[in-house]
Image: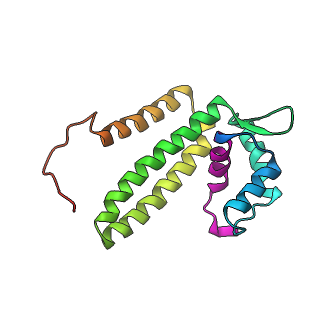
Amino acid sequence: MGSSVPRGFSRYFILELLKEKTYTGKEIIDYAVEQSNGIWKPSPGLIYPLLGRLLDEKLIEETKDGRYQLTKHGLETAQDVDKINDIVKNQLDVLFRLGNVGRFVALDLLEKISSMGSILSSNVTNMTDEETQKYKQFLQDELNKMDGKAVKKKGKEIKIE
């Protein structure tokens, strides 16, 4: 499928998949093919080196029977990705309601957030504990803002119908 699959997608696909149960490398490939109705056929040359990197980053571990499972750190990372996706989804929902201009802005925003997420994800293993905590606190503060818990909003209220 090549460039049709966004950069970094395979990494998140594996983390999401392993949240549910353990898989072998071949089962991961077969599941991807099945779920995409044959459109995406990740090669062993993509999946196995990626599994190796996830092992090196201590996001996954291999069981005695050759299956892969998330580590505690891997589960936390996958949950952080879920939180970011929720934030983006909520922001996109508002933007899409604004009409065509919102769509253009949303697509631009999505591309920037995706790039930022890929950079952060690839660097998370190199972050100090203090940097990781600051990053987690930032994400939590943003979630709280969206829930209206952390900050009282100033200015006019805009009603979107």
Q: In which quarter of the image is the C terminus?
A: bottom left
Q: Give the vertical position of 86 relative to 148 (above or below).
A: below
Residue at (68% x, 31% y) in the render: 71
The residue stretch that appears in magenta: 1-19
Q: Give the answer, above or below, for where 91 lies relative to 143.
A: below
Q: Which residue is drawn at 19% across and 42% down?
A: 153
Residue sitting at 70 percent across and 40 percent down? 21
The x and y percentages for residue 56 are 74, 37
Please state if 148 lies on the left or on the right of 12 as rendered: left
Q: Is residue 79 above or below residue 97?
A: above
* Image side of residue 90 versus residue 66, left or right: left
Q: Nearer the viewer, residue 145 or 137?
A: 145
Predominant SS along the magenta part: helix
Q: Residue at 74%, 40% (x, y): give it.
A: 22
Q: Is residue 48 visible?
A: no
Q: Position of residue 104 (x, y in %)?
A: 38, 69
Quick one: which residue is furthest to the right in this view?
Answer: 65
Q: Quadrant of the N terminus?
A: bottom right
* Residue 160 magenta: no
Q: Position of residue 111 (x, y in %)?
A: 48, 61
Instruction: Place residue 53 in its image quadrant.
Output: top right
The image position of residue 50, as x and y in percent, is 74, 49
State yes or no: residue 3 in magenta: yes
Image height of 14 relative to 39, above or below: above
In-image side of 144 versus 14 (left or right): left
Answer whether residue 137 is visible to the viewer in this image. Answer: yes
